[in-house]
Image (cartoon, grey):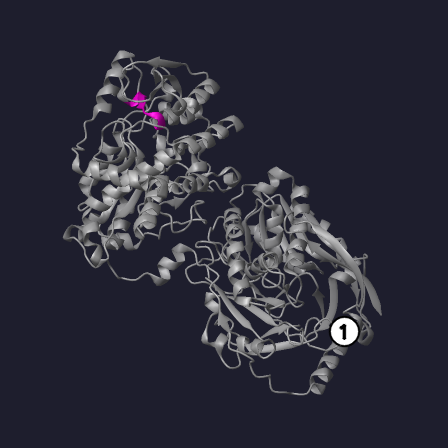
């Protein structure tokens, strides 16, 4: 019997499926159907999607073998990814954009981990988590469930963010993805277990095929009524399996007969030794959804895929038929490497993965599993040793196999004479091994692998900084799990409050501050969403000022490298440690780090910490720094100075902490408040024009007693949902691209500055005091000098008026636009030491906060 089938191929530009030329092939379920009387009925596509095989399983004899899942049957990676992506698009359409943005996608281990990822890709804005059968030390369970018919039943849910399953708010949809929806028991049991812990109003079940019997079809509506929630089902195709009486016993006998008849033979000897290929997996991107995978992770991976695929393509040489072979739950990473490899080479690329599932192999075109390789488990599984399998690899004519495993599975058992690599090498001329790092949440790493090793040189004063307390603190957060910056760019000594509601409209927020003596750091302003006109101003400003910023970055960095004590001890492995004051200092710190690497090959550590006016710097962050670095090596970094309030705040806060220098290095010091700077001009720094979208998508820092405990860092939010508007990388890249261009000017300016008297003049403070009196404000805290501070007033406060230096040009285009949008007058004045000054309304008390961060009575 033959079936007319259509090859459905994913367009990797759009993610959509297109159809290719139809061919006549024998249906890969004929062998089982003819011998057991099993019937597969359904819509016209059902036999294209499914074949049949037999397995040793006391609960179910037959196995539905998917042709587009990428588990047992090698398939084009683009077809596999496209099948899930298309389902995700349908889910997004079903939910609508608003609900899709709040959804969480949950996939099932091991078979549907890659499918669930692809569905999340199709939705585009939803985080993804898959269940796992691999416990991870230090990561608490957020739930678990059993899969009744499976050969391995226990599923664990181990999200890095313990609030992931409830983080999207009441009523947010949960999308559950499995390869097939048969009886529905597994999915409904999962929903029942999760609903008891994380109740919500809506669930969407997604499967490649809906194979429920007529008797099972009504259960979904009954179940939805039972839990009081809406439950939808999205499937690519629908069908049923008709099983004759006694099929289970018949199947067991048939399996036993086939295995007895199969001649035992020695596996073929390896044709060549496996070759390891370094794919350079992006730092901070999880290898899969075991602990969660966000849209930001997805964007970082997409950007890195072409380079990784190019590395693999180079190692493949002239191979013409290539299999990318994943590993059990590790399905998405090899799948996406496969889709990128399709783009990077003219070779025919196929994709499948190894599995725990024992299936009978029969070399017959009417049977779905033509061959199998058997090898021992190689990842030290929690359920003990056992056989693992790779199907339809032997005899499939692959002249190269790229085996992709995570680092946990890169063990001696993998490389043993009877291991997976040796088994593959017996059937192909070339075996490449690509290892991606097994992602473990930072807090789990700190609990399980923290060492007592300390820097080689320590000051006596640092030992007084409560080392025992520091050991209780978590490791820094890093991108892309927290922030859109690369992991190596910055470590955030903050706690993630992304799932906490902290924003309020400006007037309501300031009114709460005024009426209750609340502190400004206890809440967040609503993130300003720039208009298209304002975004164009930002891009124009960046184009105009990139070289000037690059020059200031180079000058301040060269000054530090020339003067800082740690630089003189470089032969001992000491370098300055950059510690940015979040968040304005962070882009500057990243650029300074890149300058040091670009010009000198120096890899400067870089962290971001919180400092709050009236409350000081985060003491726990200082304790962590002192436990991991010499405090004398630390250089505090900020974007610019206004009147010098933060400079004074830092100096006062550090009086309690020995060993740290209170000096701040800044890009621009128009107020004359510091001695280490790139320039004292008050010019437009484009990173001041926006909020989180130019600062790694991180909010201002938050300090509130009910959220920040004695062993917590100050908090901040990661606005993952703003990834589409993020220009953080654009800002960094455009400035760094000008480094070589300004190198000579930087050398001259740094030499001149090192010989000059750079003592702070506090000229800005004097000007602020004068303006405060001249305009009848009588409070310096309501006067915000400089382009950066004026921009903040317009974005986050209740402005009264803007003072602009007469003749100021394009540096103030964005200020004028914001002022126009908020109805704030701009007054041109002479003899202003700054390009502009923002005045907070002195009589609009809801908008006034004083030196301690609380409300000030108008005078």
Decide whether residue 786 is among the magenta residues: yes
Decide whether residue 739 is among the magenta residues: no
Q: Is residue 645 above or below residue 778?
A: below
As helix, strand or loop, the secondary structure at mark 1 comes to: loop
Q: Residue 843 or 378: which is nearer the viewer?
A: 378
Residue drawn at x 29%, y 12% is 775
Q: Residues within 10 Å of mark 1 (few under 14, many from 20)?
A: some
Q: Which residues are magenta?
A: 781-788
Q: Which residue is mark 1?
A: 365
Residue drawn at x 70%, y 63% is 67
Q: Tell me where residue 514 sits by quadrant.
A: top left
Residue 722 image point, x, y percent: 51, 38
Residue 377 image point, x, y percent: 53, 74
Determine whether, in the image, residue 595 is placed left or right of residue 755.
right
Q: In this rendering, does residue 758 appear at all?
A: yes
Q: In this rendering, does residue 610 appear at all?
A: no
Look at the image and tell me in which quarter the C terminus lies: top left
Look at the image and tell me in which quarter the N terminus lies: bottom right
Q: Is residue 73 above or below residue 621?
A: below
Q: Tell me where residue 609 sits by quadrant.
A: top left
Residue 357 image point, x, y percent: 62, 71
Q: Tell me where residue 554 sits by quadrant.
A: top left
Q: Residue 818 or 460: which is nearer the viewer?
A: 818
Determine whether, in the image, residue 643 is placed left or right of residue 235.
left
Residue drawn at x 59%, y 71% is 400
- Total tally of numbered discs in the picture: 1
Residue 589 image point, x, y percent: 33, 42
């Amino acid at each position: 019997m033959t079936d007319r089938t259509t090859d459905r191929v994913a367009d990797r530009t759009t993610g959509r499926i297109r159809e290719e030329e139809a061919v006549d092939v024998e249906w890969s379920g004929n062998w089982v159907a003819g011998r057991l009387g099993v019937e597969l009925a359904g819509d016209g596509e059902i036999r294209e999607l499914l074949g049949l095989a037999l397995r040793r399983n006391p609960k179910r004899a037959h196995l539905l073998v998917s042709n587009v899942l990428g588990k047992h049957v090698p398939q084009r990676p683009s077809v596999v990814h496209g099948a899930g992506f298309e389902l995700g698009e349908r889910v997004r359409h079903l939910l609508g954009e608003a609900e899709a943005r709040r959804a969480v996608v949950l996939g099932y281990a091991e078979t549907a981990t890659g499918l669930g990822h692809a569905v999340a890709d199709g939705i585009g804005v939803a985080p993804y988590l898959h269940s796992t059968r691999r416990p991870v030390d230090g990561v608490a369970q957020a739930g678990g469930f059993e899969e009744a018919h499976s050969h391995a039943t226990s599923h664990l849910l181990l999200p890095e963010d313990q609030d992931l399953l409830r983080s999207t708010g009441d009523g947010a949809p949960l999308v559950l993805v499995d390869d097939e929806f048969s009886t529905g028991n597994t999915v409904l049991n999962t929903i029942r277990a999760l609903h008891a812990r994380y109740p919500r109003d809506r669930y969407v079940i997604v499967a490649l095929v809906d194979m429920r019997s007529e008797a099972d079809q009504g259960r979904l509506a009954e179940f939805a009524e039972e839990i009081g929630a809406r439950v939808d089902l999205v499937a690519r195709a629908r069908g049923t399996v008709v099983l004759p009486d006694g099929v289970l016993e018949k199947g067991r006998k048939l399996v036993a007969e086939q295995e007895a008849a199969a001649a035992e033979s020695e596996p073929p000897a390896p044709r060549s030794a496996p070759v390891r290929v370094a794919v350079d997996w992006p730092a901070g991107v999880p290898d899969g959804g075991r602990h969660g995978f966000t849209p930001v992770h997805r964007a970082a991976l997409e950007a890195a895929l072409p380079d990784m695929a190019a590395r693999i393509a180079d190692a493949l040489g002239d191979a013409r038929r290539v299999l990318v072979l994943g590993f059990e739950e590790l399905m998405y990473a090899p799948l996406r490497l496969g889709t990128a490899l399709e783009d990077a080479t003219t070779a025919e690329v196929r994709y499948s993965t190894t599995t725990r599932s024992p299936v009978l192999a029969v070399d017959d075109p009417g049977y779905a599993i033509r061959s199998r390789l058997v090898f021992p488990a190689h990842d030290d599984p929690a359920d003990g040793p056992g056989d693992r399998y790779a199907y339809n690899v032997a005899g499939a004519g692959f002249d190269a196999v790229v085996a992709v495993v995570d680092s946990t599975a890169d063990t001696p058992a993998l490389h043993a004479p009877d291991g997976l690599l040796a088994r593959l090498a017996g059937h192909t001329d070339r075996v490449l091994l690509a290892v991606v790092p097994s992602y473990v949440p930072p807090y789990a790493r700190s609990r399980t692998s923290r060492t007592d090793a300390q820097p080689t040189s320590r000051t006596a004063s640092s030992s007084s900084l409560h080392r025992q307390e520091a050991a209780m603190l978590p490791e820094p957060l890093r991108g892309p799990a927290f922030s859109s910056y690369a992991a190596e760019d910055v470590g955030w000594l903050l706690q993630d409050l992304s799932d906490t509601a902290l924003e309020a409209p400006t007037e309501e927020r300031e009114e709460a501050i005024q009426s209750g003596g609340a502190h400004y750091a206890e809440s967040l302003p609503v993130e300003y969403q720039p208009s298209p006109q304002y975004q164009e101003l930002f891009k124009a400003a960046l184009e105009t000022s990139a070289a000037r910023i690059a020059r200031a970055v180079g000058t301040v960095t060269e000054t530090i490298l020339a003067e800082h004590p740690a630089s003189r001890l470089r032969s001992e492995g000491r370098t300055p440690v950059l510690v940015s004051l979040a968040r304005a200092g962070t882009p500057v710190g990243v650029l300074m780090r890149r300058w040091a690497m670009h010009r000198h090959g120096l890899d400067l550590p870089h962290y971001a910490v919180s400092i709050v006016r009236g409350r000081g710097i985060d003491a726990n962050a200082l304790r962590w720094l002192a436990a991991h670095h010499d405090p004398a090596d630390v250089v505090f970094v900020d974007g610019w100075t206004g009147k010098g309030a933060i400079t004074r705040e830092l100096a006062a806060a550090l009086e309690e902490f020995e060993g740290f220098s209170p000096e701040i290095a800044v890009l621009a010091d128009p107020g004359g408040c510091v001695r280490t700077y790139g320039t004292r001009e008050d010019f437009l720094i484009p990173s001041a024009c926006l909020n989180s979208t130019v600062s790694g998508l991180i909010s201002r820092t938050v300090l509130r007693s009910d959220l920040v405990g004695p062993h917590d860092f100050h908090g901040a939010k990661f606005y993952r949902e703003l990834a589409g508007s993020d220009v953080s990388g654009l800002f960094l890249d455009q400035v760094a691209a000008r480094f070589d261009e300004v190198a000579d000017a930087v050398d001259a300016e740094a030499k001149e500055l090192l010989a000059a008297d750079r003592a702070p003049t506090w000229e800005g403070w004097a000007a602020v005091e004068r303006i405060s009196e001249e305009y009848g404000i009588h409070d310096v805290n309501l006067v915000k000098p400089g382009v950066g501070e004026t921009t903040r007033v317009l974005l986050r406060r209740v402005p009264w008026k803007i003072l602009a230096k007469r003749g100021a040009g394009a540096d103030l285009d964005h200020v004028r636009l914001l002022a126009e949008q908020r109805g704030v007058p701009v007054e041109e004045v002479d003899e202003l030491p700054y390009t502009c000054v923002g005045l907070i309304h002195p009589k609009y008390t809801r908008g006034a906060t004083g030196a301690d961060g609380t409300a000030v009575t108008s005078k």
